[in-house]
Image (cartoon, grey):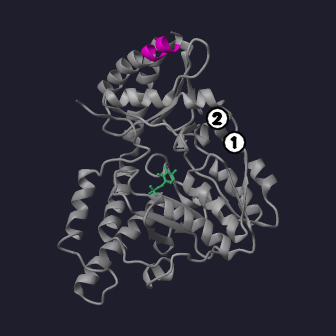
């Protein structure tokens, strides 16, 4: 059976060109980048080149780039590092963030931290004015993502950063879903910290970047050796770093081409869904201005109740189609996605939703295959629901 993969916001395959760049660093150039000999030096030179490449892509200085194990660690690094360095205790964020930000912020309660949630509108946007209202003398950090991983909404980071600057509050953004998809420049967006992950952009898993603007109050939380100028202990993941730099280079070089491809696939998908379902489905989030490759869809049965999204996902899986939903199964009961809940969807609609996240290698034929199967599956589920 063929596999149709529409879950690129969860992870992507490693691009062959990335793998090729990485391979010698597993075998031939296996040195520890901190070792004082030739093998170590070979690795170090390659790492510093990768650091320069990445810094240039996001408009940073190489010394402002710290390699981490991925998006989750970078988010932890921003929140924990800012909280321990500034006098403040409040972390201004939103309930639409990735769990790497949400759960880290919640965990900071044990250290006297206090998460403060700014509400999003029904399309997932954070209003900079609301951020400003939430800022006070106890604010340690504002952390708001760039592109939402479930609904694709693009937050107005530039406007939010202006508010932060005005009040002298450090600003972190989880840019895991925006890097390589839309332009990300730390000065343009006014960021003090950002998080990047390799495996969302056809790089390897377990590697990421934490960007830290020079002179921003911040303390390390991962202690160990003197790597990364004592800001992040641990032997450098040399092949991962080489792979991440290559993946970022490719993603940025091919960004426009991919964007056009996603726009055309999205158009085909929506035209198909309109034809099959009419008003028995809806797109969650911003329908026009989000990133084109993330499409979050709720299916509504004729009574207006939602379909069982979990069952829908399983039925599609049987047909070889991989999609996702943001809901979590906690103690046997379905919890709606915190993002869909955060934009005000009721439980039924939220639980009837699935997310498609397209990748560069998806084809029009795969969209057509999805449309054929979704029609079968949803109609079958609706007739069972009526019976
Ligand atoms: C995937 C993802 C993360 C986590 O990145 P990892 O490298 O898997 O730890 C964080 N934030 C967002 C928005 C993500 O999509």
Q: Residue at x 38, y 40 (%)?
A: 258
Looking at the rendered structure, the secondary structure element under dot 2 is loop
Residue 19 placement, left or right of 6: left
Residue 335: give x, y in percent of width and height: 59, 39
Residue 20 placement, left or right of 48: left
Is 262 part of what is drawn in magenta?
A: no
User: Do the residues bearing badges 2 and 1 touch, measured as CB atoms within 8 Å?
Assistant: yes
The outermost residue toward the left is 28
Label 2 and label 1: CA atoms lie apart by 8 Å
Is 382 part of what is drawn in magenta?
A: yes
Looking at the rendered structure, the secondary structure element under dot 1 is loop
In the picture of the structure, the residue carrying the numbered disc 2 is 123
Does residue 170 appear in the picture of this structure?
no
Q: Residue at x 60, y 27 (%)?
A: 349
Task: Return the residue nearer the eye: 46 or 10.
Answer: 10
The answer to whether residue 342 is above or below residue 170 is above
Task: Return the residue nearer the eye: 352 or 59.
Answer: 352
Write down the region rendered in magenta: 379-385
Q: Residue at x 61, y 72 (%)?
A: 81
Residue 13: give x, y in percent of width and height: 31, 48
Residue 58: give x, y in percent of width and height: 48, 60
Residue 269: give x, y in percent of width and height: 42, 23
The answer to whether residue 16 is above or below residue 4 is below
Q: Which mark is residue 120?
A: 1
| Magenta span main SS | helix
């Amino acid at each position: 059976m063929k596999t149709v993969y529409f879950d690129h916001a969860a992870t992507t395959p490693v691009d062959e060109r990335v793998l090729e760049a990485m391979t010698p660093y597993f075998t031939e150039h296996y040195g520890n980048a901190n070792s004082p000999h030739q093998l170590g030096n070979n690795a170090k030179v390659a790492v510093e080149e990768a650091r320069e490449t990445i810094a240039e892509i996001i408009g940073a200085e190489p010394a402002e780039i710290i390699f981490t194990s991925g998006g989750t660690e970078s988010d932890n690094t921003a929140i924990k590092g800012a909280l321990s360095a500034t006098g403040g205790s409040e972390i201004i964020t939103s309930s639409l963030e990735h769990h790497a930000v949400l759960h880290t912020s919640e965990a900071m309660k044990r250290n006297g931290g206090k998460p403060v949630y700014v509400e999003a509108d029904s399309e997932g946007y954070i209003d900079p004015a609301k951020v400003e209202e939430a800022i006070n003398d106890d604010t340690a950090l504002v952390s708001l993502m760039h592109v939402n991983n479930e609904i694709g909404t693009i937050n107005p980071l530039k406007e939010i950063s202006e508010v932060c600057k005005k009040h002298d509050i450090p600003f972190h953004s989880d840019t895991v879903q925006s890097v390589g998809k839309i332009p990300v420049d730390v000065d343009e967006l006014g960021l003090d910290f950002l998080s990047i992950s390799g495996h969302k952009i056809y790089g390897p898993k377990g590697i990421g970047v934490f960007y830290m603007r020079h002179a921003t109050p911040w303390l390390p939380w991962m202690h160990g050796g003197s790597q990364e100028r004592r800001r992040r202990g641990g032997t450098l993941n040399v092949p991962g770093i080489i792979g991440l730099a290559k993946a970022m280079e490719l993603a940025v070089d091919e960004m426009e081409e991919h964007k056009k491809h996603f726009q055309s696939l999205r158009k085909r998908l929506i035209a198909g869904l309109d034809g099959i379902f009419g008003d028995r489905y809806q797109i969650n989030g911003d329908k026009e201005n989000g990133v084109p490759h993330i499409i979050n869809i709720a299916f509504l049965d004729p009574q207006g109740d939602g379909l069982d999204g979990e069952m829908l996902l399983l039925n599609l899986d049987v047909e070889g189609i991989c999609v996702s939903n943001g809901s979590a199964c906690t103690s046997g009961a379905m919890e709606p996605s915190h993002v869909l809940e955060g934009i005000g969807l009721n439980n039924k609609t939220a639980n009837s939703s699935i997310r498609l996240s397209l990748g560069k290698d998806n084809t029009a034929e795969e969209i057509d295959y999805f449309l054929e199967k979704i029609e079968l599956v949803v109609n079958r589920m609706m007739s069972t629901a009526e019976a």
